[in-house]
């Protein structure tokens, strides 16, 4: 059946198209005449128009052909709208400009991204191909959740058979179950999601998969993001440049006209009763009282939604009385303001009052009381907190918007109209393009996923409006779903690589505009200027006259590395012991490894004890503690200092454990006490100041942080309340069991959003840009839409300010200490190479005679080309050989990828002499011969500094060596009987051939500049890497302590009830998994996450990427989560972001140098 609207729409489009064809010559003379009309038909806009009508007519003329799905092509008609006011041409030329300006660096960055992707996919394939938890049965006739994957069997080719689990192969479904990582092509999609920072299978990874995932989260994400970051930055740069060019001629006019904004109320000089009333209403005392009521009503509303206060009728009654009084006061205040506002010249007369009523703050003021009185009139009763009636939650949520009254002190939100006006042209182009992209990609994913065998996928893509919710999340950088069809995987991959950056441009413009306003209006000033007028940022060591005896001075200098080489060695020794004990402390949380290296722990505590006593003894000689004090007070002052407390935490747990008797509270809390040993990491802050710089950063950026934190906090409160209103009665959208939230079965979103405080946790996660919770109702999705569009960019500003403050602080400290720029010199290799180029020195003569010299020169010219006045020339033979090597490298990568596919591997077989073995031998001989020739000709290669040893230790030499070494090692181990041919171990060696892709570095310079990247960002990395490590390890330890026994992450055997009785407890009744297994038997109960510190480190590494794959924490875990959302992610991202910027800068400089050489 076809709707009347559809028929009318198609008829209108048809008539419109015929008229456009008829008048095509008026648009362009080249379309004149019959042939001109023929030329018009394949034009862009003509094809857009045809795509919106032809599917209808084809379906109508061929009734036996089901082309209903092709109607999505009408979405192409959206592209015609871009032609309005020439915006399509502007948008299209924008793409050209971006790719043209970034063409050099973009190619290198794309090589880095693709190489990282292939490497990650290969490592995941090796790590997860035998992981039973990665078996998926949802594409066939089986219910994936009902299949016991532990009963499935994987053969030597990687083919999964789940017959024993009740899902046998059939003629229609020959392989109904398969491992999601059974081949590199399959693994590449999930690796791609991880490289986007998304981990939808976070709780299914095995041990080695978590190791790979941690590396991907910490390092690889940064490398893979280079191309998208370069394109996004290029768009923003060109857009801002175009805007500045267009507005340059109007700047003087704008400066003269001003913005006309009326921000602050003025005192009335009138002696009339209206003037007196005006001054009273705007008196500071009244203003502070109103502020108290605003904060009070917000806090009481949040508390009244919690289970504790809902059970206290007396407290709820007090809350209701307070809310009622506040509403009366707000009402009276608004009426009085309306009466006397004419005293302000800006709001004089009737038109002024209308202007006042329609401005932002008065409208917010109206929302704080008018809905309350409407509810009273409609229900004939006062809204009360009892049972959280909808009217009460609605009027209370609207009342929280009154917190925007504090806007008058910060002007954080009233600048948005300035930002929108200032960047209206940019927002129009990019915003409209983003809207069209959203609708079009939603239609594509609807087409590809509406018949997906997975019922969850079908649910989210059953209509285009349903698909728009998930597509919105995809475009914002989220991938909460992953079981797509092939077309869906391609589409979501394109979204992640290209569309996400483009879709985020208008959001980024809002955020950048807000940040720009903050920088202009809240300029930060350092605390103390030095004699030269520059800011002294941070704590500098000031030389003072030392107190104390000679032995105390000697001890102080020795423990602080100031008394010669021996003290420096001791300092390095302490570094090493700290790192080793932290690693041992992490490993000891693994079951069965509790006593690992216990003797070393005792030795380390002894060393730390001696160090602590030495520092205590030398405290009087420390200017920080001994200046102006006697020995006793200096030591007392040291004992209560920050570093002393950290030192005590590093040693006391062992002593407490040793002296306490058995059967005491240590049996319960001993593991938590031992986790304090991880605080030893903070001891390193003495030597590399990092954590102690945070207060300096906050002081430096205090004004900017005050404005942005107010904006972020206000949005957090408003959206938390609104999302709670949308979801607290949602009993239809199901979620996993959450026993901690008192729901064991058939749980829904209302069990997550039990109170507004619960809502604040999920809202905070969403405001960081992550959406691990997607089961929202329509109202909840509507709220989330506004969070994605307007809130995420603003809320992220405080974290960005802290990060930029850290970088600024570290760089300023470095300049101040060194009295020079922080730019670093090249390393030894580059210094030597530059000296060779400057001196134009030729290669040394061979000691084996002139014939060897001639051969080495010939081989070098063959491999590296001949230098002719700075231009590299290639002979026909050497050029052809270079192309041949390139082809062999690419074919090797392709061979590894294809061989990983079970169907191909099984078809080729493992018999000696099979295609892959022969091709591998051929490749090894080619690469080995090339490596030998490069070693032979290195004495004539200036890039190798005319040295074979130098070449062998450069990036290129190491890569060339590793291209063949695994093959020789593999066959050597097989020959001596340490490894069996065609085993899993040999598969690992074969897959490692994928890293031959790094040999393409000969053609595209990228990874060989990593040392430059680290040197360029050395100062910032030194100061922030420790902080990032402390945040990572510290939060992992806290999550391990708080969540290791969280029933929300517990699984039990089907024979165990979820809840039981006192005599027969259920799965969720036990406080620990160990007690559950002790009662029911070994391995009957299992904790799936945060089982030990290595496990916790993996999850926190993912969280610090901004990806919250787990969210249903206990309240202590929620507080850790909130810390990471508010500050931890921003601080952790500083070293990664620094490397990102340095890598982009370094490869950009390389491209510029190459272009200059070509010119």
Image (tube, helix red, strand yellow):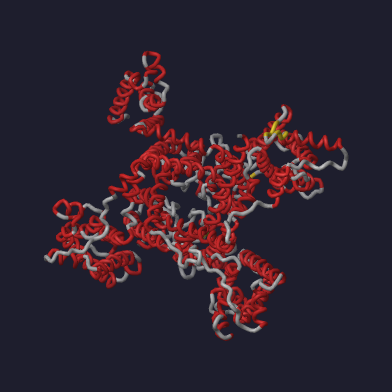
Q: Quadrant of residue 849?
A: top right
Q: Is residue 151 above or below residue 37?
A: below
Q: Quadrant of residue 1002?
A: top right
Query: Which quadrant, please, contains the C terminus?
Result: top right
The residue most toward the top is: 34
Work out whether residue 1123 can be spotted: yes
Name the residue: 80% across, 48% down: 977
Query: Which quadrant, please, contains the N terminus?
Result: top left
The foreground one among 600 and 1063 is 600
The foreground one among 121 and 503 is 503
Q: x, y (%) of residue 1110?
A: 48, 56
The residue most toward the front is: 532
Name the residue: 70% across, 69% down: 569
Q: x, y (%) of residue 610?
A: 66, 78
Is 843 positioned to the left or the right of 179 in the image?
A: right
Q: x, y (%) of residue 565?
A: 72, 69
Q: Is residue 1066 above or below residue 349?
A: below
Q: x, y (%) of residue 1138?
A: 55, 53
Name the residue: 59% across, 60% down: 1022
The foreground one among 17 and 522 is 522
Is 174 positioned to the left or the right of 285 in the image?
A: right
Work out whether residue 462 can be spotted: no
The residue most toward the left is: 272
The foreground one among 789 and 517 is 517
């Amino acid at each position: 059946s076809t709707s009347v609207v559809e028929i009318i729409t198609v008829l209108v489009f048809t008539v419109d198209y015929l008229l456009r064809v008829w008048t095509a010559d008026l648009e362009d003379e080249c379309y004149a005449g019959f042939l001109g009309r023929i030329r018009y038909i394949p034009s862009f806009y003509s094809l857009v128009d045809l795509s919106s009508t032809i599917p209808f007519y084809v379906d109508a003329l061929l009734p036996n052909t089901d082309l209903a799905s092709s109607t999505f092509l009408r979405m192409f008609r959206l592209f015609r709208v871009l032609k309005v006011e020439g915006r399509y041409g502007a948008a299209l030329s924008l793409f050209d400009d971006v790719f043209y300006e970034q063409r050099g660096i973009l190619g290198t960055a794309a090589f880095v991204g693709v190489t990282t992707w292939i490497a990650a996919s290969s490592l995941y394939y090796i790590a997860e191909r035998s992981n039973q938890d990665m078996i998926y049965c949802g594409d066939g006739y089986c219910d994936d959740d009902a299949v016991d994957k532990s009963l499935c069997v994987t053969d030597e080719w990687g083919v999964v058979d789940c017959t024993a689990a009740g899902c046998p192969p059939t003629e229609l479904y020959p392989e109904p179950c398969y491992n999601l990582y059974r081949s590199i092509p399959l693994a590449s999609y999930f690796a791609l999601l991880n490289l986007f920072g998304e981990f939808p299978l976070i709780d299914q990874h095995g041990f080695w998969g978590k190791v790979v995932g941690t590396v991907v989260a910490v390092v690889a994400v940064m490398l893979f993001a280079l191309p998208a970051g370069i394109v996004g930055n290029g768009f923003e740069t060109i857009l801002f440049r175009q805007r500045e060019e267009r507005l340059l001629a109007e700047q003087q006019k704008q400066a003269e006209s001003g913005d006309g904004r009326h921000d602050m109320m003025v005192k009335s000089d009138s002696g009339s009763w209206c003037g007196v009333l005006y001054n009273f209403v705007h008196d500071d005392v009244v203003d502070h009282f109103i502020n108290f009521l605003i904060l009070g009503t917000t806090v009481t509303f949040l508390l009244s939604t919690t289970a504790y206060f809902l059970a206290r009728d007396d407290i709820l009654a007090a809350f209701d009385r307070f809310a009622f009084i506040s509403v009366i006061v707000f009402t009276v205040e608004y009426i009085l303001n309306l009466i006397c506002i004419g005293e302000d010249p800006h709001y004089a007369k009737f038109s002024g009052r209308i202007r006042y009523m329609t401005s932002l703050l008065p409208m917010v003021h109206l929302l704080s009381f008018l809905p309350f009185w409407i509810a009273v009139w409609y229900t004939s009763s006062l809204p009360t907190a009892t049972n959280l009636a909808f009217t009460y939650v609605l009027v209370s949520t609207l009342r929280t918007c009154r917190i925007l009254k504090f806007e008058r002190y910060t002007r954080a939100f009233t600048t948005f109209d300035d930002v929108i006006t200032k960047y209206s042209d940019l927002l129009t182009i990019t915003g409209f393009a983003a809207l069209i992209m959203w609708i079009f990609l939603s239609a594509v994913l609807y087409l590809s996923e509406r018949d997906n065998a997975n019922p969850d996928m079908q649910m989210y893509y059953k209509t285009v409006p349903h698909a728009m919710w998930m597509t919105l999340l995809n475009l914002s950088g989220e991938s909460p779903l992953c079981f797509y069809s092939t077309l869906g995987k391609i589409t979501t991959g394109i979204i992640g690589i290209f569309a996400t950056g483009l879709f985020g441009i208008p959001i980024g413009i809002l955020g950048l505009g807000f940040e720009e306003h903050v920088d202009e209006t809240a300029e930060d000033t350092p605390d103390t200027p030095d004699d030269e007028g520059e800011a002294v940022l941070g704590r500098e060591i000031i030389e003072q006259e030392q107190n104390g005896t000679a032995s105390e001075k000697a001890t102080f200098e020795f423990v602080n590395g100031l008394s010669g080489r021996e003290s420096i060695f001791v300092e390095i020794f302490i570094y090493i012991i700290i790192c080793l004990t932290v690693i041992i402390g992490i490993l000891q949380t693994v079951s069965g490894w509790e006593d690992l290296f216990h003797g070393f722990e005792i030795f380390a505590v002894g060393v730390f004890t001696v160090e602590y006593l030495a520092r205590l003894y030398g405290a009087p000689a420390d200017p920080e503690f001994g200046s102006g004090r006697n020995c006793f007070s200096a030591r007392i002052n040291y004992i209560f200092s920050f570093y002393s407390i950290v030192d005590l935490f590093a040693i006391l747990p062992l002593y407490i454990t040793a002296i306490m008797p058995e059967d005491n509270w240590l049996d319960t809390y001993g593991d938590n006490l031992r986790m304090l040993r991880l605080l030893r990491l903070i001891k390193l802050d003495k030597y590399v100041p990092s954590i102690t710089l945070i207060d300096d950063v906050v002081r430096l950026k205090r004004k900017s942080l005050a404005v942005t934190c107010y904006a972020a906090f206000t949005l957090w409160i408003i959206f938390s309340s609104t999302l709670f209103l949308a979801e607290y009665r949602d009993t239809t959208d199901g979620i996993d069991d959450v026993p901690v939230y008192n729901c064991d079965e058939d749980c829904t979103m209302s069990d997550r959003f039990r109170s507004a405080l619960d809502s604040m946790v999920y809202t905070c996660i969403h405001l960081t840009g992550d959406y691990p919770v997607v089961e929202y109702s329509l109202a909840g999705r509507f709220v989330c839409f506004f969070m994605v569009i307007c809130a995420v960019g603003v809320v992220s500003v405080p974290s960005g300010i802290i990060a930029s403050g850290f970088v600024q602080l570290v760089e300023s400290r470095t300049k101040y200490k060194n009295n020079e720029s922080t730019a670093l010199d090249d390393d030894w290799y580059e210094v030597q190479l530059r000296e060779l180029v400057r001196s134009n020195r030729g290669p040394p003569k061979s000691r084996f005679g002139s014939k060897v010299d001639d051969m080495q020169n010939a081989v070098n010219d063959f491999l590296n080309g001949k230098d002719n006045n700075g231009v590299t020339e290639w002979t026909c033979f050497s050029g052809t050989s270079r192309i041949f090597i390139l082809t062999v490298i690419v074919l090797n990568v392709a061979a590894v990828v294809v061989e990983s596919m079970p169907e191909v591997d099984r078809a080729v077989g493992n018999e000696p002499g099979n295609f892959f073995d022969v091709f591998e031998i051929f490749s090894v001989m080619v690469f080995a011969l090339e490596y030998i020739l490069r070693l032979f000709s290195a004495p004539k290669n200036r890039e190798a500094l005319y040295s074979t040893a130098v070449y062998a230790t450069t990036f290129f030499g190491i890569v060339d060596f590793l291209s063949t070494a695994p093959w020789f090692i593999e066959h050597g181990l097989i020959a001596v009987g340490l490894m069996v041919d065609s085993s899993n171990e040999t598969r690992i060696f074969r897959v490692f051939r994928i890293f031959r892709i790094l040999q393409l570095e000969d053609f595209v310079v990228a990874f060989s500049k990593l040392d430059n990247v680290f040197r360029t960002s050395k100062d910032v990395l030194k100061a922030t890497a420790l902080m990032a490590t402390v945040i990572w390890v510290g939060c992992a330890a806290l999550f391990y302590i708080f969540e290791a026994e969280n029933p929300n992450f517990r699984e039990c055997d089907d024979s165990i009830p979820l809840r039981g009785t006192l005599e027969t407890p259920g799965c969720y009744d036990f406080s620990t998994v160990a007690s559950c297994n002790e009662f029911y038997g070994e391995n009957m109960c299992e904790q799936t996450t945060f089982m030990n510190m290595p496990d916790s480190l993996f999850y926190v590494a993912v969280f610090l990427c901004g990806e919250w794959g787990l969210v249903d924490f206990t309240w202590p875990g929620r507080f850790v989560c909130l810390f990471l959302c508010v500050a931890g992610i921003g601080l952790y991202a500083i070293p990664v972001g620094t490397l990102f910027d340095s890598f982009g800068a370094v490869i950009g400089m390389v491209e510029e140098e190459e272009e200059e050489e070509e010119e």
